[in-house]
Image (cartoon, rainbow, N blue to C red):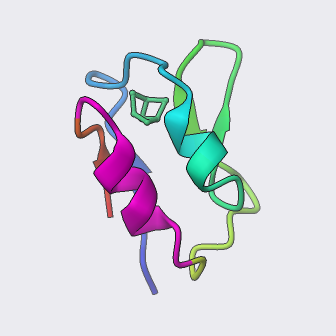
Amino acid sequence: MANPKVDLDLCIGCGVCPEVCPDIFEMQDDGLAHVKQDADKNADCAQEAADSCPVDAIIV
Ligand code: F3S
């Protein structure tokens, strides 16, 4: 099972990952992306989100 993470030191809050992969990522009040509590970690969009992140903040 994949265990995607967002490196919060890198994320600039661009908002792409929850758009590409709403099953796993969400924007939170800090303006940064986080892995959702109930994330479907088997969703196959995690890699796509990682590839789409402009600052490579997503580790799959
Ligand atoms: Fe942040 Fe990258 Fe997502 S900058 S909001 S982790 S696409």
2 magenta-colored? no
Q: Is residue 35 above or below residue 34?
A: below
- Horizontal side of residue 27 vs 48, given as left or right: right
> Residue at (36%, 25%) from the top-left corner?
11
> Residue at (34%, 53%) from the top-left corner?
50
- Horizontal side of residue 50 vs 23, given as left or right: left
Please provide percent x and percent y for residue 55. 24, 30
Q: Is residue 29 above or below residue 47?
A: above
Res 35 seen here: no
> Residue at (48%, 19%) from the top-left corner?
13
- Number of numbered discs on residues: 0
- Whereabouts is ligand 1, in terms of quadrant? top left
Q: Which residues are magenta?
A: 44-55
Q: Is residue 24 above or below residue 16?
A: below
Placement of the C terminus among the 4 image quadrants: bottom left
Q: Is residue 55 above or below residue 18?
A: above
Please provide percent x and percent y for residue 17. 52, 43
Please provide percent x and percent y for residue 58. 33, 47
- Horizontal side of residue 24 vs 33, given as left or right: right
Please provide percent x and percent y for residue 57. 29, 37
Res 15 seen here: yes
Q: Farthest residue in the bottom direction?
A: 1
> Residue at (41%, 62%) from the top-left corner?
48
